[in-house]
Amino acid sequence: MIRIFVTGGTFDKEYNELSGALFFKDTHLPEMLRLGRSRVGVSIGTLMMVDSLDMTDADRALIVDACRQAVEPRIVITHGTDTMVRTARALAEVFPSGGKKTIVLTGAMVPYAFGSSDGLFNLGSALSFVQVLTPGVYLAMNGRAFEWSQVTKNRETGVFESRS
Amino acid sequence: MIRIFVTGGTFDKEYNELSGALFFKDTHLPEMLRLGRSRVGVSIGTLMMVDSLDMTDADRALIVDACRQAVEPRIVITHGTDTMVRTARALAEVFPSGGKKTIVLTGAMVPYAFGSSDGLFNLGSALSFVQVLTPGVYLAMNGRAFEWSQVTKNRETGVFESRS
Amino acid sequence: MIRIFVTGGTFDKEYNELSGALFFKDTHLPEMLRLGRSRVGVSIGTLMMVDSLDMTDADRALIVDACRQAVEPRIVITHGTDTMVRTARALAEVFPSGGKKTIVLTGAMVPYAFGSSDGLFNLGSALSFVQVLTPGVYLAMNGRAFEWSQVTKNRETGVFESRS
Amino acid sequence: MIRIFVTGGTFDKEYNELSGALFFKDTHLPEMLRLGRSRVGVSIGTLMMVDSLDMTDADRALIVDACRQAVEPRIVITHGTDTMVRTARALAEVFPSGGKKTIVLTGAMVPYAFGSSDGLFNLGSALSFVQVLTPGVYLAMNGRAFEWSQVTKNRETGVFESRS
């Protein structure tokens, strides 16, 4: 059984057709897992629905705490890409490599509700990596898994890259 | 660098709007990797474009041979779901668990070109599993990875399940 | 109030992920009208769900009869493209140009359930033409409206053309 | 031959995956006409790419002037929904009902690039209405055609309604 924590991010943004603005309503995770015909046992919990640029230290403490209380040793967190590394660092202080939990953060560059989203690919990737990686905190983006301390988001290209 | 071999299957079926029949044209793999913003180094080769129910022993021999000649230790094969296990068995005779190559077969229940395809999810999953699993032959379907000898496709439900 | 009669056709075909065949389940008309944010008053009735190549004379008689019994003067019929002209001819014998009913047949080259369908465009077109055309029997395809006796489907290109 | 003038609006908005903001790039009109398998002769010109809330009097003067210079008697204008009625009024001062040109404005509540857009339906509708309506200025939204002076956008529901 894998625990999935939803925190919002581009993944779950929708288009408000009255205001023309992007906003959060419900998570698309269950629908995405259905589309992927996933048969991985999961338990989904929504912790918050925020743009990761708006995520506070209190929000991060809440995420860390939720992971601490989770009985499952394997956890996927959906998260905005802009501060994903920062949340990963906060998690790594509590869940070290070689510890007891494998935590994989993932997200999307384009909302799932839009035609051209990378969300379904990333979810398939994160859910797979979390099943086989050894304990530690990772990011799954662009088809790759990175140890949290080895990755940075290139803001020019939107691509997650190994730190040099 | 990961080698991807395309063999056809539901994954790549398209709708012929003149005849109303499903058929194969080109593979959608490059487009799918672009949509997933994949940055995994891959080299794609199309071995055949067939429905896996039409796959012959000669076709399977060709697939095995292509894997043998591949210099990459990690290989993903896109394949129709109906005889995926049979091709996996043919591969396992040459590439045993504990050998030198990690081979992951994947496919889709619904063509990628249709709205409701599981293809992008499965591709994200297969590409992730192949990077971390130890040598052997696996199927990646429904968000899970199965050792080839431990899995069967339930034809009533379309779901891949562990053999009891 | 506009009457919509559903008869099947490519419009409403779906993909059976267990058999890999195309088949009919329910009509997508209500979902399509919702997607188009249509506020045209409509009353939808499903007469049959068949490939128009399989449509019999009895089926056509049933369609003609349904139009006769409809109280609405404006009717849209969704129909397979292969024999759309033949059904239009059967209707025209009963509902002549200059009579009391405006009947517009429409369809799709690609099922609505697939990504690349022309269905929504054609539905918007047919629903618009039926509101303004004078009594008679028409086909609405490729963004145009044709009087039934002036059109033929070009089987090489899939395009509806004026008869020369 | 029908003239299509593009002015931007929700229709053509795209998602910038680096900034997370909506923006304009190129118009999707040619792609949409291709998807609809349209065989209506059209000539497309982009006048501007703006949110209709940002449209100035100078922009409206430019649209009116473009319609004046167009040799085609039938014109479709894609336009943001928020000030569509205002532009229609500016056009009606020059192109009265009973004049020489039939002008139909249309738009979308959801960008075409997003999964759930009404754009294709509206385009099919506008392109059909413009071929048959008598000279005057109209809005084609929600599957209906309204004379410009008889319609208002309900901002609570996003629906275009007859003025009472």
Image (cartoon, coloured by chain):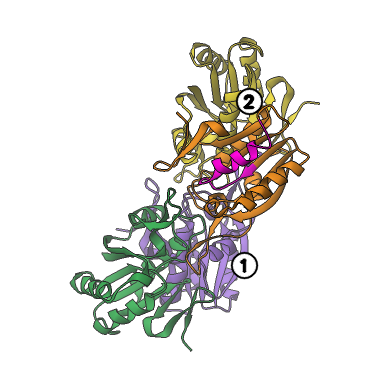
Chain colours: A yellow, B orange, C green, D purple
* Residue C23 image-quadrant placement: bottom left
Q: CA distance from mark 1 to mark 2?
A: 43 Å
Asked if residue C104 lies left or right of residue A146, the reply is left
User: To which chain does the residue with label 2 belong?
Assistant: A
Image label count: 2
Residue sitting nearer the eye, B6 or C30: B6
Q: Position of residue A34 (x, y in %)?
A: 45, 38
Residue sitting nearer the eye, D48 or A22: A22
Q: Position of residue B164 (x, y in %)?
A: 45, 28
| Neighbours of disc 1 within 10 Å: few (<14), some (14-19), many (20+) | some
Point 30% across, 76% down: residue: C102
Q: Position of residue B69 (x, y in %)?
A: 76, 44
Residue that carries the numbered disc 2 in the rendered image:
A84
The extreme bottom residue here reads: C164
> Does C74 appear above or below C164?
above
Q: Nearer the viewer, mark 1 or mark 2?
A: 2
Name the mark on residue B35: none
| Neighbours of disc 2 within 10 Å: few (<14), some (14-19), many (20+) | many
